[in-house]
Structures are given as C-alpha cells and as structure tokens.
Image (spheres, rainbow, N blue to C red):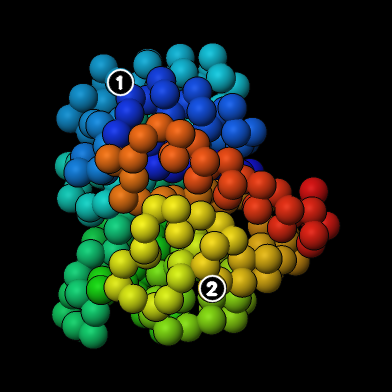
Amino acid sequence: MKLGVNSVLFGGYDMATAFKYIAACGYDGIEISAIDSMSQHLVVDRWRELAPVIKQHSQAHNLPILAIEHPSQDPQKMEAVMQAAAAINCPIVNCGPGGKSNDDATLRQSIDSLGKLADMAGKYGVTLCVKAHVGAAVHNTPTTLEVLKAVNHPSFGLDMDPSHIHRAGENPVDALRAVVHRVKHVHIRDCKGRQQNPGKPEMQSNGRGDIDLLGYIRVLHENKYQGPLDLEVIGAKEYELPFCVMIAAESRGHMQACLQACGAR
C-alpha cells in the first residue's frame, strides 16, 4: 500500500507548502485536492496552467501523485479533471456520489452519471472512484453494493472511507470485507462518535477516534490491496501550519505501525 495525504489538509496554504511538508512527514505520495471551497490547489478551470507546476513539485519532492479529488459529477468539470490527471500521470480521480440518502430517484441518477463518467475515465486512461458519503445517495454498504453491481466497468472502482461507513452506523471492518474486491482507492481518517460531521481536524487524526483502523488495514492487506491509502482530513483551512503538519505526521506514524502490525511492511 502507498501512504499519501490529500492536500486539502493544507488547504490554507499553497501547493508548494503541501508538497514540502507531506514529503517531510515521510509519505509515499500525495492526493491533489480539486475542492475549490476547501483549497486552491488544482483549480479545475486553470488546470492547463497548474498541471506543469504540480509535476514540478512532484518531481522536486519525489512525491508521486496518487489521486485527485473533485466532489462533483458535472461532466464538463470531470472531463477537465480527467484531462489534468492524464497530464500529471495521476491514475485515479475521486468524485462524490451526489444525491441524498434514502431517495431512490437520486440513487438512480447517480448510477447513470457514474456509468457515463466511467466511460469518460476509460477514454483518458484513468480510474474513476466514488465513495459512500454521509447524507448522499450512496451512504452505506447496501447502496454501495447497488452502485458496484450497476457500474461494472474496468475504469470504475470504489473509494472506501471508513469514517463515512462508521457514521452510517456500520462496522467499517465488516463493511470493507463485503466490497474489498472492488476497492481501488482508500480515503482514511479516524472519527470519534457517529455524528454527521467527522469532528475537529485533530480528532480525525488516525488513532484518536473509535474506528478499528488496524483491523481495516489488515483486511486490505489480506486481500492484497496495493493502492493508495490517502489521509483525508477536512476543516483545517484556518489552522496554523504546525497543526497541519502534526496531523499528517501523527497519522503517518499510526498507518505505518498498522502496516507493520499486519505484516504489510
């Protein structure tokens, strides 16, 4: 498995800062945030201008680009993200599921949209991933399984995030076993409690919450998952830089210990 950080953790700072400190914490790679409300890293409308800069940072810090995250399924935006991914040698594009929970109509819309976007991903040589998200049409294991059954496409996979599954009232370790064969990307963070939001950024740091992340990583290892394990911590845009670095470093230590404990490193 490749350990990475979504640059949204450093959303209050520029890309140069994100690359510098993610590399300093010992990560294997980086996920680029294209979430305009939380960062100004990959601004989708300026991707042609920013792609060479991202490649330069990646090479300078020996930090491969493991994924890009963009929350919408807007076809024009998503095509631009996929074009950017192809330009910077990024293999995975993560998007949000859209819709709302317990609404079959929006679940059908999401499935239709994801199928079309998977075709687009194949055109650009990238893999499109989606995850269950609190409040969205895809929000738990049953709805995730519906999507995976309907979108059986070689350029489509699951982005599994234990914190959202935990907040859906499920055991993330058991949930992972049901879908691990389709997992192409993992967004990882901890969570204390089962409230709607994931909590303060420092409480999303791996090891501070209630999720059995060791058991989660063990299931990934047992099923020979070799993809990204990207820390995604939101809400730190106003944080001072040392606090962002602390969260990245603490979480990396926990992930490394989990990998060693289950024999993955």
Determine the residue positioned at 37% across, 25% down. Answer: 15
Indicate left or right for 226 with 60 as reference.
right
Vertical order, 87 against 28 (above or below): above
- Residue shown at 39%/78% (left/top)? 194
| Occupied quadrant, residue 197 | bottom left
Residue 133 position, x and y percent, is: 33, 68
Q: Position of residue 126 (x, y in %)?
A: 44, 42
Amino acid type indicated by mark 1: Leu
Q: Is residue 58 left or right of residue 27?
A: left
Q: Earlier in the sequence, mark 2 or mark 1?
A: 1
- Quick check: 227 left or right of 68? right
Query: Mark 2 — residue?
Result: 210
Q: Is residue 144 above or below residue 153?
A: below
Residue 67 placement (x, y as % from top left): 45, 41
- Label 2 and label 1: CA atoms lie apart by 38 Å
Mark 1 nearby-residue class (10 Å; few <14, some 14–19, many ≥20): some
- Front residue of 42 and 88: 42
Give the residue drawn at x 46%, y 18%. Answer: 57
| Image disc number at residue 157 | none
Q: Is residue 215 visible?
A: yes
Residues at badges 2 and 1 in contact (C-beta under 8 Å)?
Answer: no
Q: Which residue is mark 1?
A: 50
Question: Which residue does the image show at 40% across and 32% down from the upper left?
Answer: 241
Local packing at callout 2 (Cα closer than 10 Å; few below 14, some 14-19, many 20+) is some
Residue 184 shows in this picture: no
